[in-house]
């Protein structure tokens, strides 16, 4: 576990700022947990005054590998075991981190994960819209429900939308999740190759393709979260800070 290193660019000096904590979890592998974590983290770090820290609790260290390719100060990275997560959150809050994102491993549901999902302001559950992925989501949602976690499913890697908005596959997936009683983010993320290429080079989509559909979806997803599930905790309206992620 490394220390929480303060970046120098455009970050609030006050250490009394409320910290927003987001956990990203799904028992199923390959659904986009790491992709969503790093893209949302960079999106938030681009907004003036925010200090964003990503925490990799997955022994595969995919998030850490992505981070090591970067030349940007933000987000800062901590790699730790699940049983160290609470301690990391405590240090981050004390240091003045404004937004903390936890990436988790597949099949991580355990007593060790409970504090992470219970303490989070929201737990995002990315899922692909396929029948197989939707069938597999029950165990994840049950675990989060029993943990009393604030949970939002996020449709990821959806086929391109039709003329009337969301594609049929995504709409059916949304309907199914809602019928099962799960909250679903109003903004879904499309299947776009830039998500893979950006990740492989240590970028977020907003950095390598600013203004693209992928980047806009991530931005709109964060806007939706701070107007909805995170509305209580998010600090004052943020501006874009184009210098904050300059490589
Ligand atoms: N919206 C998307 N469009 C295109 N490719 C995507 C999208 N989301 C994720 N991917 C790709 O799918 C693969 C799996 O994504 P990712 O590693 O984020 O999933 P994960 O849930 O973190 O996996 P694991 O459970 O192994 O940790 C990666 O190659 C990633 O680039
Ligand atoms: Mg991952």
Image (cartoon, grey):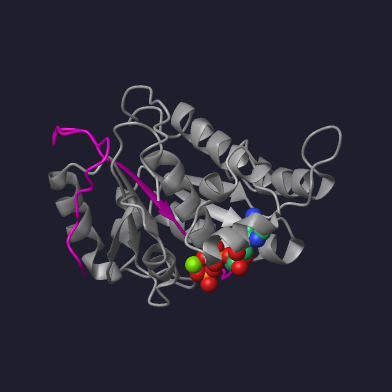
In the image, residue 24 lies in the stretch drawn in magenta: yes
Q: Which residues are magenta?
A: 1-30
The x, y position of residue 63, in whole percent, is 42, 65
Direction top: furthest residue = 237
The x, y position of residue 225, in whole percent, is 48, 35
Q: Can you tell which quarter of the image residue 188 is in?
A: top right
User: In this view of the protein, can residue 29 be seen by the observer?
Assistant: yes
* Residue 161 drawn above or below residue 108: above
View quadrant of ligand 1? bottom right
Q: Residue at x 42, y 68 (%)?
A: 109
* Residue 123 drawn above or below residue 69: above
* Residue 19 drawn above or below residue 173: above
Q: Can you tell which quarter of the image residue 174 is in?
A: top right
Direction bottom: furthest residue = 60
Q: Main secondary structure of the magenta part?
A: loop
Q: Can you tell which quarter of the image residue 83 is in?
A: bottom left
Which image quadrant: the N terminus? bottom left
User: In this view of the protein, can residue 31 be seen by the observer?
Assistant: no
Closer to the camera in the image, 37 or 179: 37
* Residue 240 drawn above or below residue 154: above
Q: Residue at x 77, y 39 (%)?
A: 166
Q: Residue at x 58, y 45 (%)?
A: 182
Side of 146 where 215 appears, left or right: right
The x, y position of residue 245, in whole percent, is 39, 45
Side of 136 where 48 appears, left or right: left
Closer to the camera in the image, 78 or 25: 78
Direction front: furthest residue = 247
In the image, residue 26 lies in the stretch drawn in magenta: yes
């Amino acid at each position: 576990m490394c220390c929480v290193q303060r970046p120098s660019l455009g970050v609030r000096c006050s250490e009394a700022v409320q910290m927003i904590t987001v956990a990203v979890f799904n028992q199923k592998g390959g659904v986009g947990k790491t992709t969503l974590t790093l893209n949302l983290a960079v999106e938030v770090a681009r907004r003036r005054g925010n200090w964003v820290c990503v925490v990799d609790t997955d022994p595969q260290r995919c998030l850490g590998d992505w981070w090591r390719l970067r030349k940007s100060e933000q987000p800062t990275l901590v790699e730790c075991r699940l049983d160290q997560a609470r301690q990391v959150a405590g240090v981050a809050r004390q240091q003045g981190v404004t937004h903390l994102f936890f990436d988790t491993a597949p099949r991580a549901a355990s007593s060790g994960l409970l504090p992470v999902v219970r303490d989070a302001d929201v737990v995002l559950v990315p899922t692909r819209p396929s029948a197989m992925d939707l069938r597999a989501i029950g165990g994840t949602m049950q675990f989060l429900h029993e943990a009393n976690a604030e949970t939002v499913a996020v449709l990821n890697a959806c086929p391109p939308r039709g003329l009337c908005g969301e594609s049929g596959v995504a709409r059916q997936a949304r309907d199914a999740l809602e019928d099962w009683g799960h909250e679903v983010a109003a903004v879904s993320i499309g299947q776009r190759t830039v998500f893979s290429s950006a990740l492989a080079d240590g970028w977020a989509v907003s950095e390598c393709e600013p203004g693209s559909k992928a980047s806009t979806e991530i931005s709109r997803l964060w806007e939706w979260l701070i107007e909805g599930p995170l509305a209580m905790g998010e600090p004052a309206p943020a501006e874009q800070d184009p210098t904050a992620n300059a490589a």
